[in-house]
Image (spheres, rainbow, N blue to C red):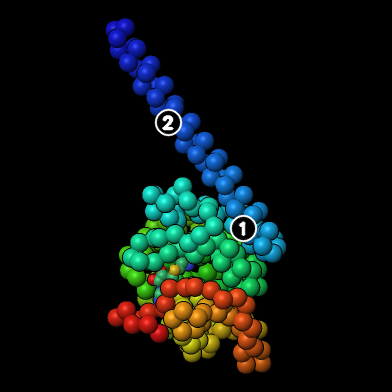
Amino acid sequence: MNRYLIISFFILISICGQKTEVIAQKMNYKQLRHQMVKEQIAARGIKEKAVIKAMQRVERHLFVPSQFQHLAYSDSPLPIGFGQTISQPYIVGIMTQLLDINSKSKVLEIGTGSGYQAAILGEICKEVYSIEIVEGLALKAKSTIEALSYDNLELKWGDGYMGWEEHAPFDAIIVTCSPSKIPQPLINQLGEGGTLVIPIGEKNVKSLVLLKKIDGDLVRKDVIPVRFVPMIDEKGREY
Ligand code: SAH
């Protein structure tokens, strides 16, 4: 009897220990996330309150494979499988700020990847639609987002070059993969006064471009040079 009591005692101690470790890890991630926002986002000029708040809230470590979770708040992109990456936090911050969105906005994202950028948009906007061309990534992002219970986010597997006509016009469109030219369907689906943020260019020379639709025309501003994975079609050919 005594032996069983002693064994139960040790099992209990071990369970409590594991729980404490999980809580400590969670707190550690929260601390790291706030540090990331302070040093990589706010310190580099991203001041928009809604963006700061969203990046403090969304747990980036839940969007990366377990072997990279300890690097989730570092200043870099990370692999998410299928040869793709989750963007560097600063790039997510600057693109989100450029979108000029608020709690009334309807936004389209091309290139769901891990779903992290979509979750950031979900924190800020009314409705978010996001398209991913790699089926495995689309499925994984769906389960990550479902587990976080966002009810304003709709994801689909498909070719984002075509946009998402059914939900157009959009107040803002963000493209997180890079075509050589702006896809015409995205221009058509952008509402009047809307903003399109997209990395454009040939293989190694890409520019993050901000476009505003004013009286039906696009007004263009090149923001910074960037590196992005190419936008591809269903056969893997680059646009
Ligand atoms: N926004 C993502 C990172 C995107 S990486 C995140 O927060 O994790 C770019 C993604 O664009 C990749 O997942 C890639 O598969 C996808 N992609 C490339 N071409 C595409 C296309 N035509 N339509 C939709 N997604 C595309």
* Image region (quadrant) for ligand 1: bottom left
Q: Percent from the top left, x then y, of residue 84?
A: 39, 66
Query: What kind of element bears circle 1?
Result: helix
Mark nearer the N terminus (1 vs 2): 2
Residue, far front: 204
Q: Quadrant of residue 126?
A: bottom right
Going 61% across and 68% down the picture, which residue do you hit?
Answer: 94
Mark carried by residue 18: 2
**Residue at (56, 65) in percent of width and height:** 92
State yes or no: Cβ of the residue under disc 1 lies below 8 Å from any atom of ligand 1.
Answer: no
Circle 1: residue type: Gln
> Which one is in front, 7 or 66?
66
Front residue of 45/61: it is 45
Give the residue at the far top of this rendering.
2
Closer to us: 119 or 113: 113
In the picture shown, does residue 35 fall above or below 200?
A: above
Query: Above or below — where is 57 with respect to 227?
Result: above
Q: What residue is shown at x 29% (from left), y 81% (from top)?
A: 235
Pinpoint residue 69: horizontal percent, then vertical percent: 44, 49
Distance between the alpha carbons at the discs numbered 1 and 2: 32 Å
Quarter of the figure that contains the C terminus: bottom left
x and y, in percent, of residue 179 in the image: 45, 82
Residue 108, visible in the rendered structure: no
- For badge 2, the amino acid type reads Gln
Q: Residues within 10 Å of mark 1 (few under 14, many from 20)?
A: many
Give the quarter of the image for residue 44. bottom right
Q: Quadrant of the N terminus?
A: top left
Q: Dot 2 surroundings within 10 Å: few (below 14), some, or many (20 or more)?
A: few
Percent coordinates x, y for residue 82 in the rendering: 33, 65
Q: Where residue 40 is drawn, which disc sits there?
A: 1
